[in-house]
Amino acid sequence: MPDHPATTTKQTNQRTRVALYVTCLVDSLRPEIGFACVKLIEGLGFEVDVPKGQTCCGQPGYNAGHWPQARQVAKVQLRALEGFEYIVVPSGSCAGMIVNHYPKLFADDPVWLPRAEAVAARTRELCQFLVEHKWSPAVSRLSARNVSPRKTWAYHTSCSCRRETRSEEMGAQLLTDAGCIVGHMKNQEVCCGFGGTFAAKFNALSTRMGQNKLEAASQCGADAVTAADLGCLLQLESLDSGAFEFRHIAEVLADQVGSQHPANEDERCS
Amino acid sequence: MTGCTANQFVPQSETALQDSALQQALSHAQTGFVKKRAQAIAMVDDFELLKFKAQAAKRNALSNLGELLEQFEHKVIESGGQVHWAGTTDELNACVVTLCSEANAQRVIKGKSMIGEEAGLNSAMEAAGFELIESDLGEYIIQLAKEPPSHIIAPAIHKTRKQVAALFKQYHALGDRGLEAISDLVNEARSVLREAFLTADVGITGANLLVAENGSIAIVTNEGNGDLSATLPRVHIVVTSIEKVVATMEDASDILEVLARSATGQHMSAYTTFFNGPKRERDVDGPTEFHVVLLDNGRSALLDGPFEPMLNCIKCGACLNHCPVYSNVGGHAYGWVYPGPMGSVLTPLLQGLDAAEPLPNASTFCGRCEEVCPMGIPLPAMLRQLREQQHQRKLEPFTWRMGLSLYSWLSTKPRMFPYCQWLLRVALKMLPKRLWPAGRKPIQAQGNSTFMKQWSQQSDKRSQSGE
């Protein structure tokens, strides 16, 4: 693909359609992460679509035991996400919900189970998608640029990336491939204490867990923290006294490539 | 221990977080368990295979539980022992008290038993006038401290060495002797316990496994206290629960393969003993009476239901050792006998959903417990299922119930949802700092508007420019 960028991108209707499932947290709080995702996915030569019908994956209700409601929410997402070659999610947590838990929610529903399974099979956590399509700043048709000053990143492998989508090593790999300095954070398999409603219901406990994580980040010499889940990053950011910069892995990776929009570059090529 | 204070989990956990001695004790012990387990598993060619075999043994046992228990009873009687059935913890306590009275016992030595803890056996025995001494070092320490265990395999894990030394100074005639090193503490306890072993009339132990094919019970310890409690006194009473039965010695060994590795990171515990009936004619030692008291206490009701996998639990404690919640607050915060993830499932099941409302919720669903469970118990899924039952029974706090319902409802309305996202951004901006949870910096929304809004504006532009 990088050899012939113009031929693959000129006829946009023939390009593989990728749905970006932006997630409710990114949508409302950190829209830049969504744009970073678009940049990374388009950089691989895909056409990005952001299906309008998407809202929230339904995990808050599902995890609280509101299962009939969670099914209704899931149906709305499935309707919006059907028909795409890939569904890319910048969150291990929301991707895990779609991949692992939607099929469980519809286990006894002969109509919706195949639909849930079809979407689940096409859903990727962002890092999974990037690794699957051999992303690196060099592969990206955009010129790599060095972002200064060089930071040391603490990469927090979110529990969802580790145990739901099993893509925790991919994140670390992508960061290294992109030329980032990644500190070796200890206790990576330990939770940061977010856990959705957990953080609110058990604030003191969640706070201690988050502080432990920040301590580990500090011990590895990092001055910035990244993760593939915004929930974890917000949890840690709310407990930090200003020692760290917090950025989603999509933003960190996107920063490692040029800022020009790929479409413009295509025009130049043609 | 019968009182359940699981509903006080939040204040109890907050107290625990502020307890510096507890925090010190927890940090040392937890990392040790985690490291040792990882090493033990790395040394096995295929731990997944061992897990598979152990789980198969258990599955087989649970699907034939009734038959196997009858076979077990038959074999125990055949080997000269007796089996007693206890539907409830009260029945178990009454049974043990009766057996001790019939044996004209005064002094009772006891090995570690979680079933004993579940039943509150010690207080029942003391109330009935027996002198009972715990022989497991950890149990002995918390018996002196008059505290419940805080871990299912390391009951005194919450105590620092200094605290233990202080307890021994208080209760033992130490004179000027100092107890600085751990070996001093162990020797001190040993000298007191040896005396107790030799003078006890009855020995009570738990059991890790019951073998149906020959009526044996297996006890796993690292101190040998179970063996001394079982063999020295003239009566041996085993208090255990029905789900511990397996079909064969082969099945038992399959489970033992994963037990010590998961629990303490050993290949085998220092002592793994199979006891079979009372002393025979040509035996040099052993009790003259051998009793097994089998507790149900709600377990059989779990069979064939969504919580049946919980009966797979072999009480190894791996889920506690790897739990980020347990490792920060310790076991007492959970308010009943079983702490950590397995306790957060078992306590509501055995004590009632309304007696342990916070426990199923005190999890981030990080999934580490399920990852380390050698018996394949889907602990997060069980906790989620309990939350579902709490929701059904309207046990969750009203504000949460309403808030989450509203959010779910909005999530089914793609046209309305963007306004809710916009509202969140505004609300975060307006919210006074004092309304944020204590100790947290307010989170602000970034950018000019939501992603969806910005994206639709951009794609309009893109399509206008003829892309």
Image (cartoon, grey):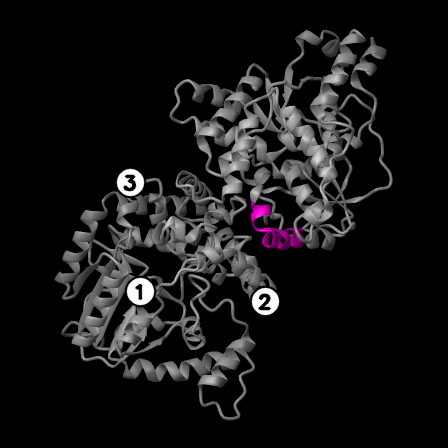
For the residue marked with disc 3, what is the amino acid? Asp
- On residue A160, the disc is none
Q: Is residue A86 above or below residue B232?
A: above
Q: Which residues are magenta?
A: A198-213
In the rendered view of the protein, which quadrant contains the C terminus of chain A? top right
- Per the model, the C-alpha gap separating discs 2 and 1 is 32 Å
Q: Would you name the residue on which mark 2 appears?
A: B19
Circle 2 crowding by C-alpha within 10 Å: few under 14, some 14–19, many from 20: few
For the residue marked with disc 2, what is the amino acid? Asp
Residue A78, image x, y percentages: 53, 21
Residue at 36 percent of width and 82 percent of height: B194
Q: Nearer the viewer, mark 2 or mark 3?
A: 2
For the residue marked with disc 1, what is the amino acid? Gly
Q: Would you name the residue on which mark 3 appears?
A: B304
Asked if residue B366 lies left or right of residue B463, the reply is left
Which mark is first along the chain, 1 or 2? 2
